[in-house]
Image: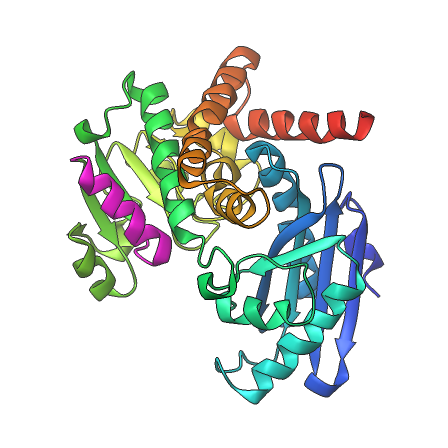
Amino acid sequence: MFEERLQGWGGEELVVRFDEPTSTWMFIGVHSTALGPAMGGTRMKPYPSPDDAVRDVLRLSGAMSMKQAAAGLPYGGGKAVLAVSSVPDRGSPERAAIIGRYAELVDALHGTYVTAADMNTGPADMDAIAERTPHVLGRSPSKGGAGDPGEGTAIGVFHAIRATCRRAFGSDDVSARTIVVQGAGSVGARLIAELLNVGAKVMAADVDAGRVAATGAMPIDVRAVLTTPCDLLAPCATGGVLSEETIPNLACHAIAGAANNQLATPEDAARLAAHDILYAPDYVANAGGVIWLAGYETLGWDDAHMRARLAGIEQTLDEVFAHAAAEGIATAAAADRIALERIAAAGRE
């Protein structure tokens, strides 16, 4: 049914289940287990068709392989999508039924895939999944988990911004920079706090103006967020914001943010370079979330080691930027080469 979508994916396994009792299509994409079990979040949302959900899970699972490899973690890439007619309320019997039956599907893979939270799922859902399978990260702290990894993502993006400023402006002194943050949600708000704490001038926009007001950042109109003059733009909301249409109008010198899939198409990386805008590849910059989950829940890191590993995102980006400059390629292509080489090397061992 989905054979055409699988062509060119390059992954290992697509698990498909239509759960008739809950009328939910459940998809798990196991893209790579070369570095370890495939790990990635569970996205719950309505889709126009099952085919659209498959396209999402294949794309996202592939991106997770790159993220895990770039982060140097003992995990491969995976992702799950629960295609529902509507997202059930938290705590509702309908939600419990979907999560419970999905947990059984995860357990049936015997550890090939390790799930976590993503869009419209959270620690409470991971707690429920953990009642039926051990192959889950992101449980509530009261249940022995690391909880919301947003703090790790924000700290990691802060270090990505430092590395990007160092490359773009010759100094990682963020206090000398004007930064526009797009999105003031769980990660964006934490990132704004980190930036303000070191003295950066921060402007921010969000569809919910109250979120921006709560951060202390200077508010700007959401319609002007991409065209507001600044040193660095930090996309921390939806993906696909950097496109053939938007890139010519950008008023920043560099980009580093938390949003996934910031490029609308792969070709947009070269368009950014052509406009002399330094781009920190999103899956390198926002890897703090998976580092947070893996480090605290499976690798036994203490706080000091976690801080050091999150700061290590700077060194990864230094390598990406240097490779891109040496090879004369876009930074996104450089990051892909580095991640793919790590995956290939693991496969040769």
Residue 211 located left or right of residue 141 = left
Residue at position x 72%, y 60% in the image: 28
Q: Is residue 9 magenta?
A: no
Tell me where the magenta segment starts and ends, as one range.
183-199
Looking at the rendered image, the quarter that the N terminus falls into is bottom right
In the displayed orientation, state which residue is furthest to the top: 326
Residue 212 located left or right of residue 263 = left
Q: Is residue 179 above or below residue 116?
A: above
Judge by depth and name the residue closer to the eye, 290 or 256. 290
Judge by depth and name the residue closer to the eye, 313 or 332. 313
Looking at the rendered image, the quarter that the C terminus falls into is top right
Q: Position of residue 191 (x, y in %)?
A: 30, 46
Q: Tell me if residue 292 can be seen.
A: yes
Residue 199 located left or right of residue 323 = left
Q: Is residue 197 magenta?
A: yes
Residue 7 located left or right of residue 120 = right
Give the quadrant of residue 338: top right
Residue at position x 52%, y 68% in the image: 121
Q: Position of residue 267 (x, y in %)?
A: 56, 35
Give the quadrant of residue 341: top right
The prevailing secondary structure element of the residues shown in magenta is: helix
Q: Is residue 98 above or below residue 297?
A: below
